[in-house]
Amino acid sequence: MNIASSGLTAQRLRMDVISNNIANATTTRTTDGGPFRRKRVVLRPRNDDLEFRTRLLPQALWRGIGEGVRAIKIEEDRSPSRLVYDPTHPDAIQTGPQKGYVKFPNVNIVTEMVDMISASRAYEANVTIIQNSSQMFMRGLEIGRR
Amino acid sequence: MQTQDILQRAMSASLVRQEVIADNIANADTPHFKRSEVAFESELLRALSSEDPHPFPAAMTHPRHISFSRPMDYREVKPIVYLDYSTTYRNDGNNVDIEKEMVDARENALRYMAMTQRVSDNFRLLDIVMR
C-alpha cells in the first residue's frame, strides 16, 4: 500500500507539472528572462543503486522487494524555443537576423495531453492496487470470524 | 495441521507478491526500470511432491551412493523475488506491462482470499470437533 501510494504521489506530481506546462504554453517572459521552458519529472525507483548494480551484476539480480518510486527532480526540457513572427508583440526580438520573431515556449500541447492521459492512467492503476491490497487485508482480518 | 501451515506460508508469499506488483506498477513510468516477479508456488509444489510416500528405492550398496529421491522440506521454501532483466517493453528500457500487472494483482488477491477462506473453514471444523 505504501508502495502504491508512492506511485500516486509521483503521478500526481507529473500531473501538476503537466498542468503547469499547459498553463504556461504561451508565456514568453519569465523571471530568468526568455520564454518559459517545458518542465518534466524524472522518476527513479526508491531503492535504486545503479553503481552497485552494474559492478556486481549477480547480486543485482536479487534485489529484494522494491520500495516504490520517487521523483528525484524536475528537469527543464532544453529543446529550442518555437519562433513565431509577430513584430507587434512586446517580447519580439528587436535586433539581429531574427528581428520581429517572438520566442514561444517549447511546450507542445499534444505531447502534454498525451503525457497527461498516461499519468492519469498510471494513477488509476495505483489506486486499483491499493483497493486490491486493502481487500486482501480485510479478508485476512476475517480469518476465524464466524 | 500441515494444510494450515502450507496455507499460511502461501499467504505470506501472496503478500510479498502483492508488494512486488505494487512496486512494478508504481514504477510503470520510470525509465530503465525492470519488473520483478515472485517465485514460490512452483518451488512449493516441487518440495511437496518430493515427499513421496512410496519412493522407488535405490539400491545403495556404498555409503557414497546417492538416493534417487531426495525429499525437500517444504518449510525451507521461501518466496524468491527475481528481476526480469532480459526484456524491454518500451523505448525507455522499461518492461512493465500495466495490463499484465493488473491481472496478476487481481489473480493474486483472489488467490489470497480463497486461501483465507480455506483457513477459516479449517478453523471452523476444528471448532466443531472441540465442542
Image (spheres, grey):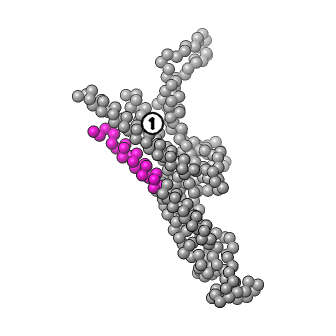
Q: Which residue is mark 1?
A: B10
Numbered disc total? 1
Q: For the residue marked with disc 1, what is the amino acid?
A: Ala
Residue A20 lies, in percent from the top left, at 54, 72
In the depicted view, which residue is nearer to us: A126 or A64? A126
Q: Is residue A132 magenta?
A: yes
Q: Is residue B71 magenta?
A: no
Note whether residue A52 is visible: no
- Residue at 55% x, 20% y: name it: B69
Label 1: how many Cα within 10 Å (few below 14, some 14–19, many 20+): many
- Residue at 61% x, 67% y: name it: A111
Residue A49 lies, in percent from the top left, at 60, 52
Note whether residue A111 is visible: yes
Residue A72 lies, in percent from the top left, at 56, 62
Residue at the left extreme of this rendering: B131
Query: Which span of residues is magenta-colored?
Result: A126-146
